[in-house]
Image: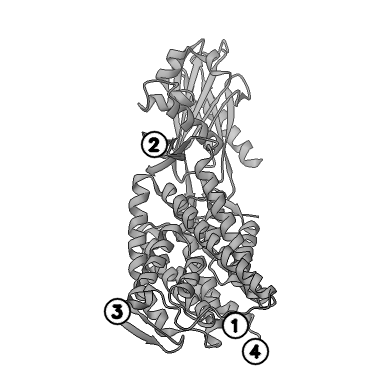
Amino acid sequence: MQIYLPIADLAINIFLLFAMGLAVGFISGMFGVGGGFLMTPFLVFLGISPGVAVATVASHITASSFSGALSHWRRRAVDVAMAFLLLSGGLVGTASGVWLFTKLRAIGQLDLLIGFSYVIMLTAVGGLMLVESVRAIIRVRRQQFSPLRRSGAHTWVHALPLKIRFRHSKIYVSVIPVWGIGYVIGLVGAVMGIGGGFLLVPMLIYFLRMPTATVIGTAAVLTTATMAVASVMHALTNHLVDAVLALVLMVGGVIGAQFGARAAQNMPPERLRLLLALLILAVGLRFGYELISRPANLYSIRAVGS
Amino acid sequence: MTSLARLCAFVAFLALSLSARSEELVVTVAPSQIAVSSSYSGGTVVVFGAIVQPNTVQPRNYDVAVIVMGPRQTVVARRKGRMVGVWINQESRTFYNVPSFLGVRASRPLSEIASADILRRQGIGLKNVLFDAGVSPHSDDPFLVNFIDIRRQQGLFDERPGGVTFLSRTAFRTEISLPDNVPIGDYQVDLKLFQNGEMVGESLASFAVAKIGVEDLVVNAATSHSLLYGLTVVSMALFTGWLASIVFRRD
């Protein structure tokens, strides 16, 4: 059954969209990420313009991450102080991101920038996670358990001034890297149409040495807030948020996320990280291949106004 | 088929009543509005026409060309080139004021209807319509050729010689199918009548493609109440997320 999408201006099979929402939701629930890095390219592949895809996926991620944030909140796995500080950086980052997005769309190099960002970020994060998770699996095989947080394992991040104690996460770090991480996530999310969860989670763990217990819940709260703001800003500046498309995707997404979260509970965390690493790496390499291989059609057209 | 019968009757009535002074074309387009609702996945417009002859004693053979043009827009065509191993957009060409939809129908292959010069001057044929819009000095310009090719693949440009069928010597009909990504707005239907390679008559008609119901509401809200619209979408997202966490709660 086809459904006509009012802002995207084309008809797409509603079951296909719903199934994609379910599948991406499953992955996002399983790994605690938004899944925008899968959803946005998929929508573009279906023929939806990148602008509409990016703007609409923001609201889809709002729904699935809010659903996740609520269940983490009930388990008291959210560091509220950390979330607020990240958010203050995230909001400024989102605003700059939406502004940058509008500028780039005008000069016609948006696709290139989005393509490059995907390749660099996905392959870098995917590669690092792959190495880390393979090492963890080997350690588990050899029955050696080494805690992620070792006493005295401080980096340059911990030497920065303006330190604050985050009681819930039991860490003592400067507000500068926290605010900076928030800013980067907000910026990247608005430009690329992704929640940035796959970037945020490793950043919080490896830079701030935050315990895994509070990372996922805090990340979900931050993602909900930045993506909600990004949705409103995209609606205000570009008028490209498709409410009908968003609704179909988010209903599938929240249901899939619940099943994904349950599937994840029966799997060792290091194997979960390995799977996520492979997935991220595969998407990154796919984008890289697209940039360097000769396109099927060298020409592209875009209407710039009526 | 009752509407078709009524249309034929209407056309026949006009053809009889207008006892003509010179060749005249009578045209009707059905439907006059294509409604784009949430179930829209393509539509068809039927163009009926009748030729009113100056003297009905000797019936003549006519040729007809029908050009359907959607709302005009400005389009940028870009060509990718290789730079440091990466394919990026390089040269571009802007086409101003070109139809967003273009359907060309004729009773015979265009080259048999009139000379290339007349076709170009009258703007008949995909390239000629764009040429008429002052787009490009060369009809084999690669940007123009690829622009037309891409629009064809999207189902937005379509040329079918032989797409016009004569129901009698003086009455004809043709169909224009609109794709699911049809541009919204007013469409112009231009009919041109030929005889022995000369243009002997012309007539204009129009129809509209408009969003109705929910589709219209959403577009209106998104453009003229964008803050409220954005907040509504976010509330919808938060509500959906909350509902899922309640429904699937296990304690």
Quadrant placement of the N terminus of chain B: top right
Inspect the image, locate mark 4, and give the three-letter code of the amino acid beneath it: Asp
Inspect the image, locate mark 1, and give the three-letter code of the amino acid beneath it: Ile
Q: Give the Cα distance between marks 4 and 1.
A: 10 Å
From the image, tell me which residue sits under label 2.
B90
Residue at image point 50% right, 44% down: A291
From the image, tell me which residue sits under label 4.
B251
Q: Secondary structure at mark 4?
A: loop
- Chain under callout 4: B
- In front of the other: A271 or A42: A271
Marks 4 and 1 share the same chain: yes
Q: Secondary structure at mark 1?
A: helix
Q: Give the Cα distance between marks 3 and 4.
A: 44 Å
Inspect the image, locate mark 2, and give the three-letter code of the amino acid beneath it: Gln
From the image, tell me which residue sits under label 1.
B246
The answer to whether residue A7 of the structure is visible from this angle is no
